[in-house]
Amino acid sequence: VTTTDPRPIPGTVPRDEAFTRPFWQAAAEGRLTTTRCRPCGRLQFPPRIVCVHCWGRDSVWQELGGTGVLASFTEIHAGPAVFAEELPYTIGLVDLDEGLRVAARIDARFTDLRLADPVAFAARSRNGTPLLTFVPTNRR
Amino acid sequence: VGAVPVGRYPSTLEHELFVQAFLAAVTEARVDRSMIDALAVCSPRPYCDQGYFSTFMAGFLGLTLTELLVEILGNGMTGGLAFDTAVETVRSGRARVAVAVGVSRETQVRSDTHMETTMRSVGDIDFHSPLGVTPISWYALNATAYMHNYAVTRRELAAVAVKNRSHAAINPLAQYRNPISTDDVLAARAVSEPLHLLDVSPRSDGAAAVVVTDDATARRLGHDVLVEVRGRGFAHEGVHQVPSTPRPVDQLFAPETAAAAAYGEAGIDPGDLSFAEIYAPTSIVEVLATESLGLIARGDGAKAAVAGTTSLGGRIPVCTSGGCLSRGHPPMVTPLYNVVEAVTQLRHAAGARQVPDARLGAVTAELGDYNGAIVHVLGRTS
């Protein structure tokens, strides 16, 4: 008897969860969102059920501009086996205009990027699940 | 101290490596089994089939303990915490003799399969792992920013790897001992740009043990030259790889805090150190750590390696063992190997790689992207 485990390999896709579902639904539409803490008024990323700054547990969803600059980037040539077909791929740290830092895929090769390059959030997916991705907006 | 040479042990099981390192350490320390009160064991890799490895080993050795038997997991800091636990157990007076010991074995698993596990550890499983992050990729992000901000080239960064290999060449415990050139480092295949194969640690198996005791017991056992723990500092910055808000990517914060505490307790300045044995799984991490530890000025870390400042014979030799890059990096026990090297240097028993008149040395361990750090200052007493 063989059984097929219907669950994806852990870590390959974000888990479905009631709290973050609005985030992933918006991301699928190309909109970047996060939570703003009501008590202290500050934003954080990723969205969380508790504010990382004040531990407040009362937050609201807020739409972000989806633009920022590259704080750093790398192109991965040796990666986990489950992502072998995507190699090489680029990931980066994006500092959003709202003062948040987001780790994401960057849709560009390492040699085509420079620090502080402007980037914008893009609707990308893998197997029907959003893949957080930014694209450079100053294509040389 | 005791350790097996770092390397690949495809057919030597965890408990066999444990026994080799453990017995080497207790034999050298002249400690009888009845004297050992506490045993702090590094949690092994997930590929260790034997569960509850620490109690299994106590049973395997028939070792009775009256103070502590614990299995410790602190990610890359695991070995540092095992050492710290042994030290604190003795310092508090609860144990006369405590042993920190561990085995790390992973080369029987392919690296790309191994990374399917580590990608879930070195990041948020929902927001980072699906990007395909790897342990090395976070350090690569440090490297890109550092190289840009301080106009450092890959050729300059390569000096760290070349220097460490030259140290490893004269360390019998080292995994890679054949010389390499700057061109070799530059020509190696990319792992995570801008870091290539020789800028990062190899995959390694290893086992190491450190015996800790109080001064009176050590003297009674007939040891004339002692290595003392003079200072200790710890810091975790409340960040798991990526902070929620921007900050510099080209410097490490936790080791700065931890080192300040360790130097303070020891009553020293970084300039007093004879050497530093740093947990640095990539060349860039060694550069950034030397700066955060106050050994090299900010922005000068790679250039200091080029100038020989951190080489044997330089102003502050760093990773005289060859470091993670060339001694090898069995992560769960790398910090114990760092202690082994520091003790060997402070006993003036390092042979060809001896730092002349070594009096004080610092050892570090870290986890994450150095989000957490532990620093010990060790000193020679004779």
Image (cartoon, coloured by chain):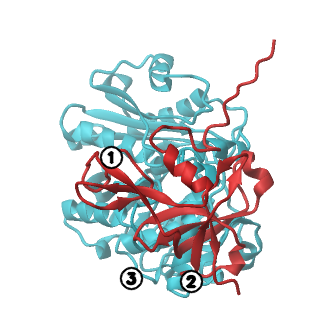
Chain colours: A red, B cyan
Q: Quadrant of residue B259?
A: bottom left
Q: Mark 2 points at which residue?
A: B306
Q: Is residue A50 above or below residue B190?
A: above
Q: Mark 1 points at which residue?
A: A50
Q: Which chain carries label 1?
A: A
- Residue B226 x/y as whole percent: 31, 51
Q: For the point 64% across and 54% down, which residue is it? A: A131
SS at mark 1? loop
Do discs 1 and 3 share a chain?
Answer: no
Q: For the point 71% across and 42% down, which residue is it? A: B113
Q: Do the residues labelled 3 and 2 touch (CB within 8 Å)?
A: no
Three-letter code, disc 3: Ala
Left or right of B68 on screen, residue B78: right
SS at mark 2? helix
Task: Measure the alpha-carbon separation of dots 2 and 1.
Answer: 47 Å
Q: Mark 3 points at which residue?
A: B297
Three-letter code, disc 2: Val
Q: For the point 32% across and 38% down, which residue is it? A: B86
